[in-house]
Amino acid sequence: MNQSNCKGSMSTASSSTNWKANDVVPDQFPAGLRVLVVDDDPTCLVILEKMLRTCLYEVTKCNRAEVALSMLRENKNGFDIVISDVHMPDMDGFKLLEHIGLEMDLPVIMMSADDGKQVVMKGVTHGACDYLIKPVRIEALKNIWQHVVRKKKNEWKDLEQSGSVEEGDRQQKLSEDVDYSSSANEGNWKNSKKRKDEEEETEERDDTSTLKKPRVVWSVELHQQFVAAVNQLGIDKAVPKKILELMNVPGLTRENVASHLQKYRLYLRRLSGVSQHQGMNNSFMSPQDATFGAMSSLNGLDLQTLSVTGQLPAQSLATLQAAGLGRSTTKSGIPMPLVDQRNLFSFENPKLRFGEGQQQQMSSNKPMNLLHGIPTTMEPKQLASLHQSAQSIGSMNMQVNTHGGQGSSLLMQMAQPQSRGQILNESTSSHGPRLPSSIGQPIMTNGIAGGVIGRNGIGDNSRGTGYNQVPPSSSMLSFPMNHTTELAGNSFPLGSSPGISNVTSKGPFQEEGNSEMKGSAGFISSYDIFNDLNQHQHKSHDWELQNVGLHFDASQNANPIQGNLDVSPSVLVHQGYSSSQRSGQNRNASAVGRAMFSGVECVEQGNMQNFSPHLNNLLVDNSIRVKAETIPDANSQTTLFTEHFGQDDLMSALLKQQQGGIGTAETDFDLDGYSMDNIPV
Amino acid sequence: MEGSPLLRQVAHQRQALFDEGLLDEQFVQLEELQDRTNPNFVEEIVTTYYQDTSRLILNIEQELERRPLDFGRLDGYVYQFKGSSTSFGAKKVKAECSLFREYCRAGNGEGCMRTFQQLKREYATLKRKLEAYFQLARQARLTQTASPPG
């Protein structure tokens, strides 16, 4: 077993092989599982480390929660699971648990010598996936891998729900997508962050991020509306349904609100130190992940996604689309402008349309789905809110594929599954580039989409972020690395993301194999990022847009990548969060992203592997999800991806699509913030 | 080997540690973790345990000199002591810690001090016996290597 020291997981990533959420598990699994152990008791820490090593896991130990958190943040995809003590001097274990859940979406196991019912219950309510009583026996540790797999499975499931992506395909795609998306995402994220205000079509980015699930991006405005509604109702009486009514945001679903509310409650609790929620528990909405994930995504992520989406859209989307679709990327003009703001929801609408319109779009290459392959729409489930958008995106993605035909074979490929649902991209973001077309390429789209989608998962997705969702399954995800760099160009906007560097400027997807990979990485990461963000991690609960991780070279991507890249940054960001966890879980998104990265140059850690499967799924799902967001047919013309996506082309395409192709659609969608170029549909 | 008196003695002493309630099942887990790659694992853990707990003992002593007693802080230290002891398998020490904590929670300063004295005694006993055991075990190992089983 490799001993991982603080980093720990990087090396393991490769050794851990692809962690496919699906039933496929590497032979050596669970060996190589990257575990982060946090406990202030040195005796216990050493013992745990030894036990875990004996189980053939890769262990990183840490005696301070803050250090652990920063390790997780730095290395988003570096860990698969976290084990933490409850009582620690510098930070309460539950607090750490929350952070991890929101930011990285990794499974966390709590442990303590205290076995009182209350404490155990607290663990449950805070989202711990298990609770171990000290002294911990090695037998108890042998099976912790189940939590990693379970989480991934859930994520996959969400993706699947939106679409019927075959896991196998998805995985494949995802992995590929991941590669792309991660980079793309990262780029997108970055871009989006930067551009938040610019209102770029972040939608496209969203698409990419929605590989997994469409996420609603909770923009600052949206969140303010939410808070206002909650305050009006009274925190105790604030139920999602009423909040939704008060907010009156079209396209926002009750689930979106519910998950956001959950996170919000957690956040308030943290602030006040009062456990207000018991309610939260209820809202634990269904899957914990959903709750957390959603919350996180809502909070921090949304913002980010927003930004991402915003950013992505134009560029990433365009690029993504271009790449994916091979079409004129210009179209998309990256639709989703900063999703952050209102766009999120507005995107949702469009996205929703996509869902419906997907079919149409698909054929027409709606630029929207920049993220065709990328499930920008992020599984509705996950995001709850994103739900809608995701759906559309999902559908969009599907669509994207159809038109993907264009240059962006990648996208197109993704699009293949288009039948799926129209590439989500299409619907949602008018991102011109419909990523979806080739999910294979997908990463790009995904990345973008992820990025875009990641953003919010929601609305953004619709933005055309080309739901990278791109019809999962099929080839799409398989990023055809060959596809040409298109994706690369596009998707890697995320470039900033750690591995993604490629995305950025890959220029027209020339780099086919590589670029794509990168792209995907970018995308994938984006997805992850988004996914993660959206889902849980949410970046540090920031209720504000944090550019979480958007440190990706947004610059590179930011515009340059035209769309795709933008996504990446943002997307990557996501990933970072989730990944830190090692999360394989967040993996969904992150995995994708991670995978992307890993696959891509970044190779973050072996994520690639993980991602791939994830990405595929994500992408697939995204596409499916995109449906909801699918951009209104209007964009259908904008084939999301122009064939030849040069980076610039892509970007422009995306942008254009968003504006142009989707332009019309956009208006429909009401992408406020997003200047979605109509997603070429 | 089986018949070696030294080894028998080692085994006997080890068993006594358990019989006297000084160590529990957790210690066995530690022993099981020791292997070729980590032949001195148990002793390493013991060292870590001693370091940790001696620091805690100092902290507790300081706390007990404060007036008024800060039971919250005291409890915190004892909690840590208990945690380490639990992971290590120090049964009696752990029991004393539990008792100590109860007094802390009850705000019983006298009870705390009394229990602390007891805790220190048990802790000293454990250390002594463990040391004797390890020494013997080391000796036995040396003898073993020195005279390979024939």
Image (cartoon, coloured by chain):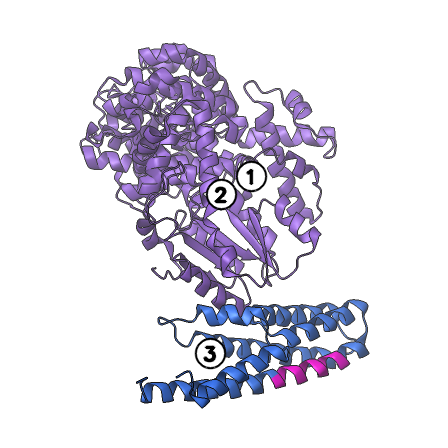
Chain colours: A purple, B blue
Of residues A283 and A182, the one drawn nearer to the viewer in this rendering: A283
- Which percent across, then down, holds residue A91? 59, 58
Residue highlighted by disc 2: A105
Dot 2 lies on which element? loop
Label 1 is placed on what type of residue?
Phe
Q: Secondary structure at mark 1?
A: helix
Q: Quadrant of the C terminus of chain A?
A: top left
Label 3 sits on a secondary structure element that is helix
* Quadrant of image for the N terminus of chain A: bottom left
Question: Can you say whether A628 is above or below A126 in the image?
Answer: above
Q: Position of residue A138 (x, y in %)?
A: 49, 60
Q: Which label number is shown at residue B43?
A: 3
Do the residues indicated by labels 2 and 3 lie within the same chain of the protein? no
**Cα–Cα span, label 1 and label 2:** 8 Å
Q: Magenta span: helix, strand or loop, mainly? A: helix
Instruction: Return the mark for residue B10.
Output: none
Q: Which residue is mark 1?
A: A292
